[in-house]
Amino acid sequence: MKFLEFSNIFCLYLAAFLTRDVVASTLVGTEAVQQGQESIESALGSESFEGLDLRSEDKAKKPGKNSNADCPAVKPNLVTVEVPPPSLADASWIWTSEVKPPSAGGTVPPGARPFLKVLHTNCPVDHVTIDITCDNFYTLYVNGKLVGSGKTTFSYPAQRYTVKIASTKLVTVAVYAEQDPGTLGGVGLLAAGVAWNSKTAVPREIRFVTDDTWKTFPADDFDRKFIMNFFDASRWKKALVLGKNGVGPWGVVTEPTSPTPQNPGLTGIPGIPDAPAAPAADVVTLGGKFPSS
């Protein structure tokens, strides 16, 4: 009998001892994970981990900055809603750092250069309108699809394209810009654009212009896949700003008053590789329905 009582007491002590270790281990583990999360947030900023809890995969997460919680309601049956067109007033002429001297009117050897602008939007968009001109030639792409092209020599009218795209939070605007082999005159690219969701009653406007946030590659051997979404341009250079719209030798480039029909990429220019081939974008003409407020 005494032996049984002793055995029972021993088992109780053993169970208590093991339980203590498990509880302690759990507490230590929880504290370690919490400290790890706090260390990461301290290093990267808490906003980088908004809505993320490393301690529980099953916890309900609050909406992060890239969720649709704060976006205007999308109404698929809504008649396509437009926004005011882009403005070139704040756009700058840009090129690569090869321009000598590095200002408006500077020259570069003939050839083609890539220019890239990537928009990461908080809310989905389904249309992009772009006003563009180039000294001398350009081919324009949106999300890997060919929008249109243009040539200029002694005058620089802008063209306007509106592109319908699949609803997305990623918009890649790419330009294959060319210096005329027949001239060593001024060179530059000028553009402005706006992206929005046409199925929201009052769309949010994501506006952009050519400036030093555009990426480029100052050599002939650039990757021609730069027109595609998710292209890695992390090692590319910032575009060189040559001057605001209005600077010489171009003067003020006025806004287009009508849409430009879709046309193919530029080919057959002596001494310059043809523009990258791509499927045609869905270039549309809208009907002028603007939000009421």
Image (cartoon, helix red, strand yellow):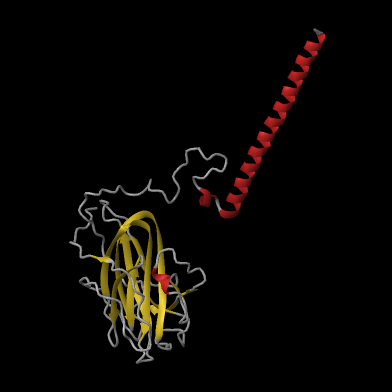
Q: In this view, does 95 lie to the left or right of 137?
A: right
Q: In this view, does 26 lie to the left or right of 148?
A: right
In the rendered image, which quarter is residue 269 located in? bottom left
User: Looking at the image, can residue 110 be seen?
Assistant: yes
Residue 147 in the image, given as x and y percentages of width and height: 29, 70
At x 31% / y 58%, what residue is drawn?
166
Residue 227 in the image, given as x and y percentages of width and height: 39, 70
At x 39% / y 91%, what residue is drawn?
184
Depth check, front residue: 88 or 115: 115
Please state, as top left, top right, bottom left or bottom right, where the N terminus lies in the image.
top right
Q: In this view, does 31 lie to the left or right of 288?
A: right
Depth check, front residue: 5 or 137: 5
User: Looking at the image, can residue 242 be seen?
Assistant: no
Depth check, front residue: 41 or 225: 225
At x 55% / y 53%, what residue is drawn?
45
Residue found farthest to the top: 1
Q: How many labels does the image show?
A: 0
In the rendered image, which quarter is residue 151 located in? bottom left
Q: Is residue 130 above or below residue 222?
A: above
Residue 101 in the image, given as x and y percentages of width and height: 46, 87
In the rendered image, which quarter is residue 141 located in? bottom left
Residue found farthest to the right: 2
